[in-house]
Image (cartoon, grey):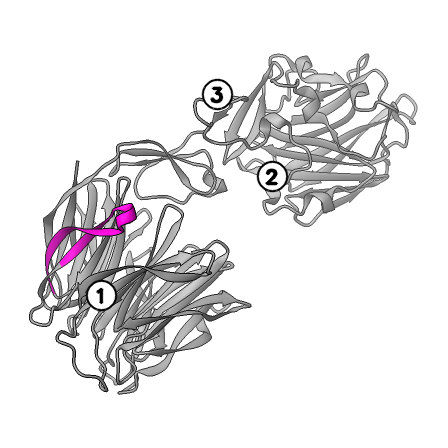
C-alpha cells in the first residue's frame, strides 16, 4: 500500500453530492455527516477502491476519526466503521464505542477457524456533545489511543494484529456493521486510514486539536458563511441554529454560524467565526436626544463606568468625590438606574470593569488617602454568592486617575495612571501583570508620566498599543503625550504627540480606518504670557497612516476644557461626543455630539446642555440606546435617550 492517507469517509461521498442516507449538519461551527439507520448497506464501498495495488490490510497503521458523539445508553454500542467480508457476518476490522469505552476489533485468520480480538480502551469519555479527534495507532501487539492530542492510552494484548489480513471481496461500512442495530447516531467529520505510521505527530499540530484535520470531504470543508450575491450554497447543510438576544455576544469559531438578534437596532446578525455580519437590519438614524433620567449621586461624579454582568444585569458605577458616603453602583431596573451598592472610596476618579476567566473585577482609582493616611486604589471582585463586589486587592497608588485593563498574548494586565506624588507630577505610572498562581496583580513595568490622566489600550492587527494622556509637568500643560507599543515583552515608545493638558484618549474605528482622539483640557505655561482663554482650545483627532506607520492629525475641533471623548454608533452612522467642562467663565457649557460626515470629517450635530461634564458613557438595552454623563460640579448625573427614526 502507498504510505498515503486513505480517506474512508470521502470514498462514501460521491463527487459533487451526498450519498443516500447522509445529511450534513453544522454544530459549533464545524460540519459533519449524520448517517441514516434505514439503509446501512448504502453507506459502504468495496475495499478494493482503497487497496488498489494490494489486497492485504496494512500490518501497521493509524486510524484517525473526528466525531461528535451523542449520549449513548448503557449497554449499547455504536459502530464508527467496519470492514466485513461479503460472505461472512464477522467483522474483519472495526471501531465501536460504548459508554466511557472504545473498542477496536480485528479478525485473526491465522487461528484455526478464525478468532475475533477486542482491544478495549476504558475511561474514554466521548458522549459530551463536543467534537473530538481520535488517533488509534496499531503495531503488532501494541495499541495506542490519543484523544484530542492528550496523553496516549497504551494497551498491549496477547494477540497481535495479523501480519496478513486479506481484504479480498471485503467492504467498508460507515457507521454500521451491515445491520441497523448499533448504527452510529452522532456526527462524523473525518475517517482516515494511514498505513505504516503513527499519525499523532501529523495531527497534533493544529490550534484546535478537537477538530484537527488530515483529510476531510470537500462537502464538510469550511465555506463562506454568507454566499456572494444570490449564489446558492453548493452543499446545503443543516445547523443547530441558536439565536442570542441582548448585548453583543462574542463571535469566535465556537459561535460560527450562530445568530444574534440586536433588539435595540432591530437587526439580525450571523457570526462568520470572527465578526458579526448583518443579515437583516433596520438602519436607524439619530433624530434627537431627550432627557431620560436624572441620576442623583452621592456627591460630584468624576467618572462613570457602565458594564454588564452576565445573567445578572446592567450596572453603572459612579466615581464620587467625597467619603462618606463614598461611591455607588447602580443597577438598571425597569428601565432606570437604581442604587444597588455603596463602596467606600477616597475622592474616586474612575472605575474599570474587567474579567479574567470567570472572575469579575471592578477597580477604583482613589485620588486621596484613606482615614489612616494610607493611599490605596482597590480592586473589588464580584461575589456570586452575595451578588456584591467585595474587596480583593489593594494597590499603592499616587493620586490615581485611571485604570486600564487589557490582555496581551493570553496574559491579563492592569495599568494605573499615577497623577502626582505630593507636588511632584513627574512620576512613574505602573503596569501590573496578573499572576495566575497567586491570583494577584504584580508589578510588571513602570513608565514615566507627567501629571497623567488616562491610559487607552488598543490593538491594530497583531500589535498592541498603550497611549498615555500627560496633563502637566509642574510648569506647563503643553507637553508630549506618548503612545507605546508592546515589543519583546514590554511597552516601548512608538510615537509622541504634543498635547495641551490632555485628559483622555479615545480610539475608534470607522470601516478600515483607525482614529485616536485626544481631549485637551487647558493651555498653561508658567514661562509664557497667559492666553486670552486657557480653556477654549482645540482637541484633535489623529488617524493611523499605515504607510508612515504613525498617527497623523486628521481634524481639530474647538472644545472647552474637554475631559472626555466617547465614540458610539447609531445604525450605520458614527458619532463622537465631547465632555466640555468649563469655558473660562461658567461650568454650564454645551457638550457636543459630532456626526461623521466622511470627507468633511466630524461635524457638530447636537448641542447638549451640561454642567461640569466629566465623563460620557454610551450603552444599549433592549429598549434603545442611551448616553450617560457625569457631572464633576453637582451631585446629579443624567441619562439621555437617543431618539431614532
State which tag comes first along the sequence, 3 or 2: 2
Vertical relation: 341 (above or below) 527? above
The residue singled out by tag 3 in the image is 232
Q: Which mark is residue 211?
A: 2
For residue 257, side relative to residue 316 (left or right): right
Q: Which residues are magenta?
A: 591-611
Q: Which mark is residue 538?
A: 1
Q: Evaluate if marks 1 and 2 touch, with contact meaning CB atoms under 8 Å apart.
A: no
Residue 439 seen anywhere in this rendered image of the structure: no
- In the figure, residue 453 lies in which quadrant? bottom left
User: Percent x, y for residue 445?
Assistant: 46, 75
Dot 3: element = loop
Q: Evaluate if marks 3 and 1 touch, with contact meaning CB atoms under 8 Å apart.
A: no
Give the camera-side residue of 343 and 461. 461
Q: Which mark is residue 585?
A: none
Vertical relation: 386 (above or below) 488? above
State which tag comes first along the sequence, 1 or 2: 2
Vertical relation: 237 (above or below) 487? above
Dot 2: element = helix
Amino acid at each position: 500500500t502507498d504510505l498515503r492517507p486513505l480517506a474512508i469517509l470521502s470514498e462514501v461521498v460521491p463527487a459533487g453530492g451526498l450519498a443516500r442516507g447522509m445529511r450534513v449538519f453544522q454544530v459549533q461551527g464545524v460540519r459533519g455527516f449524520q448517517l441514516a439507520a434505514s439503509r446501512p448497506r448504502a453507506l459502504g464501498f468495496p475495499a478494493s477502491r482503497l487497496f488498489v495495488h494490494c489486497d492485504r490490510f496494512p500490518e501497521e497503521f493509524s486510524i484517525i476519526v473526528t466525531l461528535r458523539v451523542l449520549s449513548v445508553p448503557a449497554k449499547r454500542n455504536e459502530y464508527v466503521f467496519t470492514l466485513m467480508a461479503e460472505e461472512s457476518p464477522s467483522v474483519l476490522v472495526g471501531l465501536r464505542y460504548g459508554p466511557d469505552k472504545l473498542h477496536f476489533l480485528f479478525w485473526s485468520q491465522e487461528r484455526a477457524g478464525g478468532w475475533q480480538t477486542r482491544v478495549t480502551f476504558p475511561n474514554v469519555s466521548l458522549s459530551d456533545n463536543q467534537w473530538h479527534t481520535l488517533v488509534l495507532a496499531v503495531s503488532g501487539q501494541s495499541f495506542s489511543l490519543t484523544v484530542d492530542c492528550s496523553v496516549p492510552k497504551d494497551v498491549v494484548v496477547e494477540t497481535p494484529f495479523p501480519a496478513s489480513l486479506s481484504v479480498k471481496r471485503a467492504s467498508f461500512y460507515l457507521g454500521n456493521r451491515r445491520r441497523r442495530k448499533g448504527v452510529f447516531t452522532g456526527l462524523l467529520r473525518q475517517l482516515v486510514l494511514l498505513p505504516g505510521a503513527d499519525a499523532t505527530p501529523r495531527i497534533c499540530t493544529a490550534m484546535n486539536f478537537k477538530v484537527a484535520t488530515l483529510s476531510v470531504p470537500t462537502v464538510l470543508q469550511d465555506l463562506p458563511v454568507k454566499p456572494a450575491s444570490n449564489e446558492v450554497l453548493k452543499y446545503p447543510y443543516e445547523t443547530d441554529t441558536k439565536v442570542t438576544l441582548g448585548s453583543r455576544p462574542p463571535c469566535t469559531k465556537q459561535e460560527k454560524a450562530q445568530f444574534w438578534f440586536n433588539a435595540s437596532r432591530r437587526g439580525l446578525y450571523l457570526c462568520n467565526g470572527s465578526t458579526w455580519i448583518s443579515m437583516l437590519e433596520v438602519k436607524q438614524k439619530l433624530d434627537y436626544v431627550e432627557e431620560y433620567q436624572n441620576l442623583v449621586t452621592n456627591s460630584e461624579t468624576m467618572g462613570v463606568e457602565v458594564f454588564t454582568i452576565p445573567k445578572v444585569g446592567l450596572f453603572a458605577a459612579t466615581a464620587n468625590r467625597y467619603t462618606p458616603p463614598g461611591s455607588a453602583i447602580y443597577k438598571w431596573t425597569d428601565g432606570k438606574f437604581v442604587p444597588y451598592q455603596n463602596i467606600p472610596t477616597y475622592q474616586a476618579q474612575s472605575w474599570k470593569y474587567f474579567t479574567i476567566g470567570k472572575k469579575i473585577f471592578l477597580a477604583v482609582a482613589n485620588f486621596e488617602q484613606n482615614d489612616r493616611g494610607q493611599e490605596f486604589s482597590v480592586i473589588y471582585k464580584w461575589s456570586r454568592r452575595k451578588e456584591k463586589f467585595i474587596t480583593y486587592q489593594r494597590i499603592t497608588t499616587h493620586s490615581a486617575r485611571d485604570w486600564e485593563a487589557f490582555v496581551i498574548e493570553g496574559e491579563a494586565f492592569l495599568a494605573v495612571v499615577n497623577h502626582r506624588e505630593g507636588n511632584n507630577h513627574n512620576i512613574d505610572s505602573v503596569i501590573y501583570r496578573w499572576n495566575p498562581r497567586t491570583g494577584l496583580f504584580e508589578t510588571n513595568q513602570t513608565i514615566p508620566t507627567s501629571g497623567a490622566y488616562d491610559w487607552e489600550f488598543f490593538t491594530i492587527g497583531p500589535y498592541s498599543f498603550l497611549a498615555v494622556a500627560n496633563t502637566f509637568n509642574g510648569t506647563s500643560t503643553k507637553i508630549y503625550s506618548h503612545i507605546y507599543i508592546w515589543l519583546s515583552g514590554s511597552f516601548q515608545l512608538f510615537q509622541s504627540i504634543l498635547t495641551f493638558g490632555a485628559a483622555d484618549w479615545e480610539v475608534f474605528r470607522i470601516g478600515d480606518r483607525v482614529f485616536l482622539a485626544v481631549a485637551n483640557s487647558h493651555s498653561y505655561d508658567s514661562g509664557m504670557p497667559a492666553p486670552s482663554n486657557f480653556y477654549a482650545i482645540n482637541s484633535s483627532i489623529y488617524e493611523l497612516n499605515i504607510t508612515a506607520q504613525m498617527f497623523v492629525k486628521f481634524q481639530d475641533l474647538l472644545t472647552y476644557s474637554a475631559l472626555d471623548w466617547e465614540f458610539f454608533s447609531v445604525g450605520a452612522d458614527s458619532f463622537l461626543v465631547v465632555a466640555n467642562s468649563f469655558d473660562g467663565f461658567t461650568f454650564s457649557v454645551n457638550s457636543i455630539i459630532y456626526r461623521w460626515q466622511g470627507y468633511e470629517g466630524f461635524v457638530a450635530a447636537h448641542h447638549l446642555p451640561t454642567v461640569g461634564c466629566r465623563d460620557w458613557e454610551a450603552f444599549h438595552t433592549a429598549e434603545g440606546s442611551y448616553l450617560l454623563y457625569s457631572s464633576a460640579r453637582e451631585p446629579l448625573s443624567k441619562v439621555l435617550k437617543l431618539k431614532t427614526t
